[in-house]
Amino acid sequence: MNKRYVIGNWKLHGSLSKVATFSQQLRMAPATDVVVAIAPPYPYLGACADLPSGCGLAGQDCSAHNSGAHTGEVSASMLSEWGCQWVIVGHSERRTDLAESDQLIVAKLSAAISAGLTPLLCVGESLTVRESGQEEAAVRAQLQAALSDIPPASLLIAYEPIWAIGTGVTASPEQADAMHAVIRNELTGLMDDGASVPLLYGGSVNPDNAGALFDCPHVDGALVGGASLDGTSFSEIVEAAQASLRQ
Ligand code: PGA
């Protein structure tokens, strides 16, 4: 795929002053085949509208509902009104901390698509599952549960092994590439356009390891947590993505 995606997931981090500092640090090349976006906490979406042009916005999650009596929820159409083009769905922290079910994830994918957003569906196995050798089956099962009934017309996938998230332990390029090949194979069976769905890797991506990951044939980009909080390190990851396209 002759395009790369670098999406920063700020999780529950940031402040108005940090948005301003990030904006000053972020270096965006004028014309590029690297799609760049940040998913800030909802209250900072407005402030992030002032980020350098070329850096888009994503939601970290969305409600399965469009409106109604659902205190604390934010709908996909609200995210769209704030300029979001993408929304993360099924992040492992939500699957674990908030017990998000496969059924809820399907409903959120559907809500995102109805609002015109492109979902970034996260899948990935726990350390226990990897150690038992069941990682491919687990990831295939997550894809089937999310995409069997109504696969979205437009979609990104992030493979985020749970043991690599926020731990400083990145999957090796070989591990990431092997799982991305499995995901590609599964997607082509589940969706008409499965061969062209961008596949991002996430889990302790940083400026030092991004280049080797982007060089993997089946890796089309990165979902970046901790290293996206600093505009300089995030810019270095974007530059590694640009360099991988020039080769
Ligand atoms: P990390 O987070 O880069 O801090 O490991 C990635 C993610 O959870 O999206």
Image: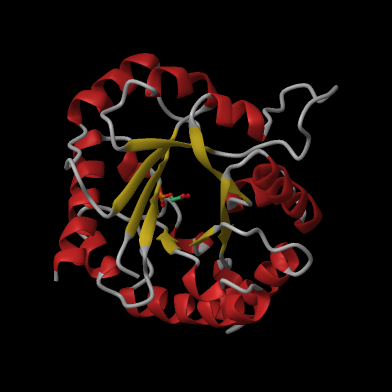
Instruction: Point out residue 107 in the picture as x, y percentages from the top left corner.
Output: 77, 49
Residue 48: horizontal and vertical position, in percent?
A: 38, 24
Q: Nearer the viewer, residue 66 or 225?
A: 66
- State whether residue 209 appears in this view: no
- Give the left or right position of residue 126, taking residue 234 as reference: right
User: As displayed, is residue 243 above or below residue 39?
Assistant: below
x, y percentage for residue 62?
Answer: 65, 37
At x 38% / y 41%, what residue is drawn? 37
Side of 120 where 46 appears, left or right: left
Q: Is residue 62 above or below residue 222?
A: above
Residue drawn at x 81%, y 25% is 70
Percent coordinates x, y for residue 207 in the rendering? 21, 53
Numbered marks: total: 0
Give the residue drawn at x 33%, y 73%. 172
Residue at the far top: name it.
Answer: 17
Q: Residue placed at 81% from the left, 55% from the top?
A: 103
